[in-house]
DNA sequence: CTAAATTAATGACGAATCGTCAAACATAGA
DNA sequence: TCTATGTTTGACGATTCGTCATTAATTTAG
């Protein structure tokens, strides 16, 4: 029915609007200051309506997290037409993830917070389903790239029988590096490393460890890093430096 | 004065007691259910006294986090008398960190939560100082091990001029692996890897990438992992399996 | 086009929580 | 014993969460 779909679209649009407002509140004040009352007050709707969208505060958090994952996925999708060797393409993923955390620090912080059973228990099932599906799609994308490279003999066959282990290694290093860099309190260790290249170096160490060719000493991956910035993510970088 | 020190000791003991109770509350209910009122009710003190210890709820979180770091540090201290090559000793650190998250899941969860500027802003300065000092001590311990190994030519000299970068790489991989494994929602990727050896494998990939000798294919690090369990952490493992 | 039925929006309200502070209490020294 | 200093108490105001009876809007049936 056309009225049905119109209604659904309006609801979806309102939800996006509410998420925009929620982000605005966190930006202006802080994560703790995001309350349902404030969100209601800032919107042109009432509390009940807000609760029609988000079954609880935790559900709102998950909705923000889901938006973050949607953005990540769309950023990863951009490297479909990026030409480069398989290692460069993996690096592009790491680049994209770091760039996401820079462009959307609030959504990043939210994902970190949401990562806990206590939160999931209070979120609506539909929300959780959407969330984990998007996550799986991204994992599968990374795994697909590893599979192809393995078929082409570009990395060690030692982990051939469990590609998910390799996926996990790359994922864990990206996540760990970026999370510590961007969310940790300032510490002497972090002050003494080059923040701009830390993620590239860490990814390179992992890829070297997987004997993923060409090795870091056989190829100028700093140049690749710059090329990824220009050819894939110029748009995001422009808005970031505006 | 002896009364002074007695007073101070009593206060410190009471603080530890309150932390025990806080953990108990989170264990029995959930992180969100830990309220100052409940903590007060469960203790034999009043709200004002509890607030004499913790300037805010966030300060209480930081206190829990500080306890976690103290425990981690004491666990790392245990491997002073562990005999093994330098790679095995690094692995023992990863093992210790993972074991900590298994023995103290609540403290681990808290550390993750606390990792945000918004929380630190509401914690007392003294608490933050204690926290970051303990953290630095652990980073320096790891860095020291890397330094020694570098001096003995046991890993690539490529990162010689910035040992903190190597420190960060190992730290990021350990943190990322454990955090995703233990805090993430169940996802197909994680269901298809061997959770018990994932941290060892990821650490091995990083160490191979650093060309840290002997390589993972030249040495039975699974045996090292078992040896670490027996020789260093048998005590903790016993309480874990009780 | 009107009236009934269904669906959506509203905001006042109860319960729970945070952090404060004037008053009660305890302790140490004169 | 009495005073000065420090500690403990719990009632209280201010917020916040989530609910639900009431009101408004929309759809359907006649």
Image: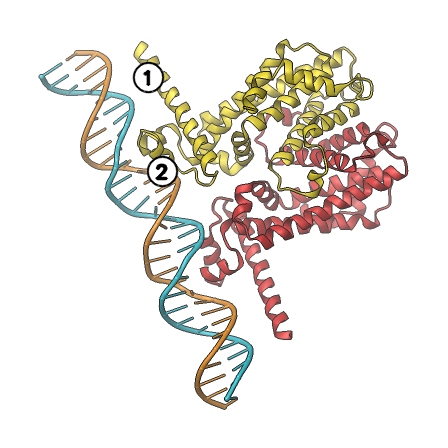
Chain colours: A red, B yellow, C orange, D cyan
The answer to which of D8 and B162 lies nearer the viewer is D8
Task: Identify the residue at image location x=55%, y=49%.
Answer: A61
In the image, is residue B225 above or below residue A112? above
Q: Is residue D6 left or right of residue A126?
A: left
Q: Residue furthest front?
A: B242
Question: Does residue A224 show up?
Answer: yes
Examine the image and state in which quarter residue C21 appears.
Answer: top left
Vertical comparison of B229 with B29: above or below: above
Check disc 1: other Cα within 10 Å, few if <14, some if 14-19, many if 20+: few
Q: What secondary structure is marked by label 1? A: helix
- Dot 1 or dot 2: first in sequence order is 1
Provide residue B88's location: percent of width, then percent of height: 71, 16
Q: Quadrant of residue A88?
A: top right
Q: How many marks?
A: 2
Residues under numbered marks 1 and 2 in contact, where contact means CB atoms less than 8 Å apart: no
> Dividing the picture into quarters, in which one does residue A2 lie?
bottom right
In the image, residue B240 lies at what x, y percent?
56, 24
Q: CA distance from mark 1 to mark 2?
A: 25 Å
Give how far across and how far down residue C3 sits, in percent.
Answer: 44, 86
Circle 1 residue:
B7
Dot 2 corresponds to which residue? B37
Q: Chain of mark 1?
A: B
Say if labels 1 and 2 share a chain.
yes
Which corner quadrant holds the C terminus of chain B?
Answer: top right
Q: Nearer the viewer, residue C1 or B42?
A: B42
Query: Where is residue B152 shown, x and y percent of the image?
Result: 76, 10
In the image, what residue occupies the spot 63% across and 24% down? A189
Name the residue at 50% across, 50% down.
A57
């Amino acid at each position: 029915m056309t009225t049905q779909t119109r209604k659904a679209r309006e609801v979806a649009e309102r939800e996006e609007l509410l998420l925009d407002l929620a982000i605005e509140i966190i930006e202006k004040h802080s994560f703790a200051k995001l309350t349902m009352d404030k969100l209601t007050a800032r919107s042109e709707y009432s509390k009940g309506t807000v609760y029609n969208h988000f079954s609880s505060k935790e559900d709102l958090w998950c909705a923000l997290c889901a938006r973050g994952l949607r953005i990540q996925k769309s950023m990863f999708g951009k490297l479909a037409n990026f030409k480069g060797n398989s290692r460069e393409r993996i690096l592009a993923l790491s680049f994209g993830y770091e760039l996401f955390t820079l462009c959307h620090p609030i959504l990043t912080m939210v994902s970190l917070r949401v990562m806990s059973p206590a939160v999931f228990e209070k979120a609506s099932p539909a929300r959780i389903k959407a969330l984990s599906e998007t996550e799986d799609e991204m994992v599968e994308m990374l795994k697909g790239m590893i599979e192809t490279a393995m078929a082409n003999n570009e990395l060690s066959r030692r982990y051939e029988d469990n590609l998910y282990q390799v996926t996990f290694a790359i994922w864990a290093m990206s996540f760990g590096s970026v999370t510590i860099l961007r969310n940790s309190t300032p510490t002497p260790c972090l002050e003494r490393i080059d923040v701009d290249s830390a993620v590239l170096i860490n990814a390179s160490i992992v890829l070297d460890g997987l004997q993923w060719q060409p090795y870091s000493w056989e190829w100028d991956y700093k140049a690749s890093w710059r090329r990824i910035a220009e050819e894939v993510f110029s748009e995001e970088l422009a808005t970031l430096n505006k």
